[in-house]
Image (cartoon, rainbow, N blue to C red):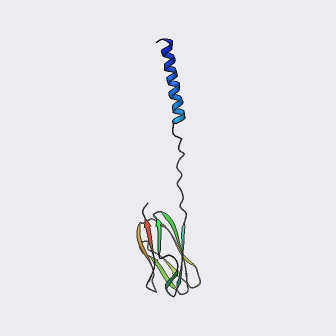
C-alpha cells in the first residue's frame, strides 16, 4: 500500500471513531424500581350509610391502599374478593391496609347494616 492509501484509511478510521463517540446512545443507568405511594381513602359512615367518601375507588394493580373508616354505630366492613374486614366502633378510626394485587371490581359492604359502602376498581398495569 502506498502512503496516501494508508493516510485515507487512517483518516476514515478516525472519522468513524469520532462519529461513534458523538452519536452513541447515552448509557442507561440501572432502572431502580419505583415504590408506589400508598393511596389513602376515608369513609364517614352515619347510621349504616356512607355519608362522606368515594363511591368508587379506582387504583392500578400493585398499588398500596389504606381505607380509613369513621362511624357513629358499631358495624363491620368487608372488602369482597380480598376477604379483608375491620370492626367499626363509634368515634374510633378503623382501617384496612393492603396491596391491590388482584384486578377487577370488588364490593365493600357493611355487614350489620347490610349496605354497600363502596366499590374498589383495580385496573391491570
**At x 51% / y 12%, what residue is drawn?**
3
113 up-or-down from 26: above or below: below
116 up-or-down from 101: above or below: below
Depth check, front residue: 13 or 88? 13
Q: Position of residue 120 (x, y in %)?
A: 45, 72
74 up-or-down from 123: above or below: below
61 up-or-down from 95: above or below: above
Q: Quadrant of the C terminus?
A: bottom left
Number of numbered callouts drawn: 0
Q: Position of residue 16 (x, y in %)?
A: 50, 28
**At x 49% / y 86%, what residue is drawn?**
48
**At x 51% / y 39%, what residue is drawn?**
25
Depth check, front residue: 35 or 16? 16
Q: Position of residue 15 (x, y in %)?
A: 52, 26
Q: Position of residue 97 (x, y in %)?
A: 52, 71
Depth check, front residue: 69 or 121? 121
* Residue at far top of view: 2
Amino acid at each position: 500500500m502506498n502512503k496516501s492509501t494508508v493516510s485515507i484509511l487512517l483518516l476514515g478510521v478516525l472519522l468513524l471513531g469520532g462519529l461513534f463517540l458523538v452519536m452513541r446512545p447515552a448509557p442507561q443507568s440501572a432502572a431502580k424500581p419505583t415504590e408506589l405511594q400508598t393511596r389513602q381513602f376515608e369513609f364517614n359512615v352515619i347510621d349504616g350509610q356512607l355519608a362522606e367518601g368515594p363511591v368508587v375507588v379506582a387504583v392500578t394493580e400493585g398499588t398500596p391502599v389504606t381505607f380509613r373508616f369513621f362511624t357513629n354505630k358499631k358495624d363491620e366492613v368487608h372488602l369482597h374478593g380480598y376477604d379483608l374486614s375491620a370492626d367499626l366502633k363509634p368515634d374510633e378510626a378503623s382501617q384496612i391496609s393492603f396491596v391491590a394485587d388482584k384486578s377487577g371490581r370488588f364490593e365493600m359492604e357493611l355487614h350489620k347494616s347490610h349496605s354497600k359502602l363502596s366499590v374498589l376498581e383495580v385496573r391491570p398495569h
